[in-house]
Amino acid sequence: MPKVALGKTLMDWESTLAGLTEDPALDQPNIRELSAQLAELIAAVKELADEQNALEGRRRAITQQLRIVRRRGEDVAIKIRSAVRSVMGHRSAALSRFRIRPIRLHKRLTEEAGIAVYPRQDLLGPDGSQGKN
């Protein structure tokens, strides 16, 4: 069945019903029975379309409420994680239970990387050692 707009389908069905009443030769029992069925189906389609429109409006309202509640939940979760971090500290391994990455200490390799600890010559002693003697 091709996809046709509901309004166009209803117009087609209603014009078919109207055409049946215009011609007296079509006033036969089997055609009257079919036209009664089509009239019932037209009423059912209109009722279902109205219900669908009402549900669409309700769906939009519920979607908006869901977005609001979800934002509030995200805000509360952030506040909880922040409070947990303040109680447990920034380095606690237990933070991972709350999906918080703990801060790790990184050792700096100053002398091993070839960087002098005191690069200024005036801060080195006369023999090149650290500190003034």
Image: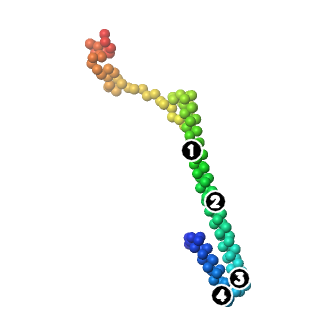
Q: Are marks 3 and 2 in contact (CB under 8 Å)?
A: no
Instruction: Mark yes or no: residue 1 visible.
Output: no
Asked where in the image residue 17 lies, by quadrant, the reply is bottom right
The residue singled out by tag 3 in the image is 32
Q: What amino acid type should be assigned to the residue bearing mark 1?
A: Arg
The x, y position of residue 13, in whole percent, is 62, 77
Q: Which amino acid does the dot numbered 2 rest on?
A: Leu
Residue at the (60%, 46%) spot, across then down:
69
Q: Is residue 27 visible?
A: yes
Q: Is residue 133 left or right of residue 65?
A: left
Q: CA distance from mark 3 to mark 1?
A: 58 Å
> Seen from this angle, which residue lies furthest right?
29
Q: Is 96 rendered above or below residue 48?
A: above
Residue 118 is left or right of residue 87, and the answer is: left
Q: Which comes before the other along the chain, label 3 or label 4? A: 4
Pointer 4: what residue?
A: 23
Q: Which mark is drawn over residue 55?
A: 2
Disc tally is: 4
Give whichever of discs 4 and 1 has the lower sequence position.
4
Q: CA distance from mark 3 to mark 4?
A: 12 Å
Cα–Cα span, label 3 and label 2: 34 Å
